[in-house]
Amino acid sequence: MTTADRTAPRVEGGLLERQPVVNDFSINIATVNGSGSQTANVALLRAIFRMGVPVSGKNLFPSNIQGMPTWFLIRASEEGHVSRAEVSPVLVTVNPASYAKDLAELPSGGVCFYADTMPAPDRTDIIAYPMPVQQLVRQVDPPKNLRDYIANMAYVGVVAQMLGVDLGEVRAALDIHFQGRASAVDLNMRMVRAAAEWAAANLVKRDPFRIERRDLTRGMILVDGNTAAALGSIYGGVGLVAWYPITPASSLAESLADYLPRLRRDPVSGKLTCAVIQAEDELAAIGMAVGAGWAGVRAMASTSGPGLSLMAEFAGLAFFAEVPVVVWDVQRIGPATGLPTRTSQGDILFARFLGHGDTKHILLLPGSPAECFEFGWRAFDLAERFQTPVLVLSDLDLGMNLWMSEPFAYPSQPMDRGKVLSAEDLERLGSFGRYRDVDGDGITYRTLPGTEHPLAAYFNRGTGHDELGNYSERPEHWEGNLKRLWRKEDRARELVPAPVEDGQGRSAVGVIAFGSTDPAIREARSLLARRGLATDYMRLRAVPFSDQVGRFIRQHERTYVVEMNVEGQMRQLLQLEYPALATRLRSITKIDGLPLAGSWVAACIEAEEGRL
């Protein structure tokens, strides 16, 4: 008999009224913000992942520092679905403030793990397990300053014991979290084991929910999108990062500051080869990045919606003066301060046309941590190839939550610095016009400051200019310059990441989505297929759109554009691009701050189709 067998929950005969639910349910953990519960929650998440079961986690936390209710959703899905589940049949609650609401939302047949300092649930259609959290804290007797944090490990132990989560994997998860600090791991595991032993001795398992070991996560990693973006930027040769703290983008710059000392030191001098600067505000941050981009440095800024608003003027300057720079916008709900800790896709139109006048930017739309890594380096290639700002639009769900991912692929292509002339090039050519379109693709040649040749110098202007960079207000110069800038769009369509299609192309119904909604769309299509409704799917990865996008819309009688904003901003961009196809595009939108649920998307499409 194994240790797992000896400590398995006792199941009272006859009390399981339905078939076991194995590796296919969601857990809602209700705690208090700022109480240190994230360590406990992620330990459970990682332990399930290490047991080979596909899993996802959604942290729903308030924008205050501490004291308000917070929820952490863990979804186990043997089929690999990682979108948010609309209903969680397992509730773990230690927060009296949200107890009544959380209990009311627990579906019939669910199970409630509750701190025994709260009243026992007054419901006969659920199964309830008390947890003596304070009793266990006294038994373990952690240092006084750590008691509130260690107390969270009580529910980890009880839930692990009752659901079958391997305690060895919990320990391994804590080892990752505490980066091998044995004393911290041992202290937390004392509470976990004490709670598990109490549950084994005192609770009789009456619920059907269980985690069983599988081998479905081999070779996968757990990572958040902001960390992935930081690593991708490092491998893309970033030389300057300028930022101002803002949720949910701060951890991107913080991850850069964490990894750079390990990954980007000069092997001879030992000095860092990248600077990370916390600016006084977002205007200063993008101003520094644009200045560094002009000087030939691969430069970036990271922000969210309110910060992007402040960056508009500099973004327009970089567009017109043709300075490469990368901006990561990790989207949250607006307008104004909005809901800083809730996710959305509400910056699409604003980012596309960021700046006054005729301004139009390249947008990259990562849909996974692996793409956050890829676009981290690819954004610099595109910015320098087209000498323009490139905006990468992630969101809070993708950026801050842990996701399963394939290991990142090291860039297989050399850096694309674009059309940069050396002193030797200038000597050979004999002439140079900074804004002269030699190749007819709208992209001019540039030199970098410090190039030692008489022809290398030029004025980088945000005002009207001719092809040599001389100030000009002549109409033909202004119109010619703008038309040249617009020609970059045609070339960009060919070089930005292409959309990804899934389906046979034979259905009357198409679905278009982008970013972190991808898992919900995939689950929705699976649900619809079981109900007899076939759909084709295209996931956009960049704007401007490639010709592939127009073909997809033409192939379908109806195409639903699914996004997290009010009026379908991506659908509007598509209608602007393809006005003749505008009536084929229909919006499915939701903007409640929560990650999309696949079941909700499926219900919306099914309802729309039923009305036809």
Image (cartoon, rainbow, N blue to C red):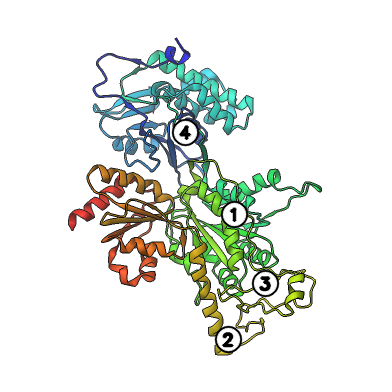
For residue 117, the mark is none
Quadrant for the C terminus in the image: bottom left
Task: Residue at 56% x, 68% y: name it.
Answer: 315
Q: Which amino acid does label 3 sit on?
A: Arg
Asked if disc 3 and disc 2 are in contact, CB closer than 8 Å, the reply is no
| Mark positioned earlier in the residue sequence (1 or 4) | 4
Pick whichever, 346 or 152, lies toward us: 346
Mark 1 sits on what residue? 377
Mark 4 sits on what residue? 217
Taking 609 as reference, is 478 above or below it? below
* SS at mark 4 in the image: loop
| Mark positioned earlier in the residue sequence (3 or 1) | 1
Query: Marks 3/4: CA distance?
Result: 47 Å
Q: Which amino acid does label 4 sit on?
A: Thr
Badge 1, how many Cα within 10 Å: few under 14, some, many 20+? many
Q: Could you tell me residue 401's position as x and y percent?
A: 48, 43
Q: Could you tell me residue 488's position as x and y percent?
A: 53, 71
Q: Could you tell me residue 275's position as x and y percent?
A: 70, 55
Q: What residue type is labelled 1?
A: Trp
* SS at mark 1 in the image: helix
Taking 508 as reference, is 151 above or below it? above
